[in-house]
Amino acid sequence: MKNIVVLVSGGGTNLQALIDAERSGNIIGGKITCVISSNPNAYALERAKNNNIPTRIIPRKNYSDPKAYSMAVLAALDEEHTDLVVLAGFMTILDECVTSKYAYKIINVHPALIPSFCGEGYYGLKVHEAALAYGVKVSGATIHFVNEKADAGAIILQGVVNVENGDTPEVLQRRIMENVEWKLLPKAVSLFCQDRIEIVGGKAYVKQ
């Protein structure tokens, strides 16, 4: 059974999707053993406590720079005997000290179809604002491994929704969360825990 540690900063809707998937038996071979928050007031912490999941708070504001913060997160991950790290609305880019030690063991969800509307500065509603401004007809979400560059790791899964006339960033965000993020993130986590993701030439392939 692999130890899954989820990193959060906000409301924790993706964390809730993972909790629900684990409860319903849709995460095979893994268990959420800890939730770490960069924000002491994150509602995600309440979701964890309501489901008897241990929590840790590592406030970003207590550290002078990203490297110092990442070192603190790395120490916590090691202490938790982490097998898989899931970034679920975690608003801090981790330093290479974390991404190199946990290479191909950190999964993130990005609310667009990478390589579109991704990289530094593209997060939250900004992603959907950019997609609508460009006039795309479909959008979606990407589940990918995390490396030293923002949103540049190997893609595991992608899902698509239609962009409708009159969509606002908020409406598009909700459609992508409900139809893609909350379904594919638990699926990717389960695939990882079953050792069904293979890396070949820096690309991720799902084994049948």
Image (cartoon, rainbow, N blue to C red):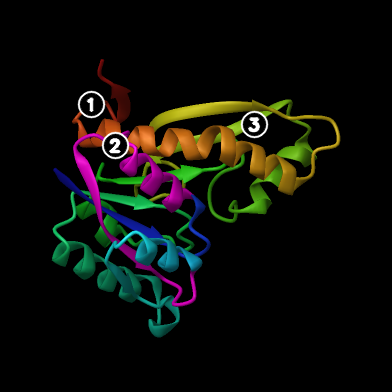
- Residue at 58% across, 53% down: 123
Please, which residue is most extreme toward the right here? 166
Q: Could you tell me residue 170's position as x and y percent?
A: 72, 48
- Quadrant containing the C terminus in the rendered view: top left
Quadrant in which residue 201 is drawn: top left
Indicate the amino acid at tag 2.
Answer: Ile
- For the residue carrying disc 3, how many other residues have a C-alpha within 10 Å: few (<14), some (14-19), or many (20+)? many
Residue 169 is one of the magenta-drawn residues: no
- Quadrant containing the N terminus in the rendered view: top left
Q: From which residue to which does the magenta span run?
A: 14-42
Residue linked to disc 3: 139
The disc at residue 196 is 1
Indicate the amino acid at tag 1.
Answer: Arg
- Residue at 41% across, 67% down: 45
Classify mark 3: helix, strand or loop: strand
Is tag 2's residue or tag 3's residue first in the polypeptide sequence?
A: 2
- For the residue carrying disc 1, how many other residues have a C-alpha within 10 Å: few (<14), some (14-19), or many (20+)? some
Q: Nearer the viewer, residue 69 or 50?
A: 50
Q: Could you tell me residue 18's position as x and y percent?
A: 38, 45
Residue 19 is one of the magenta-drawn residues: yes
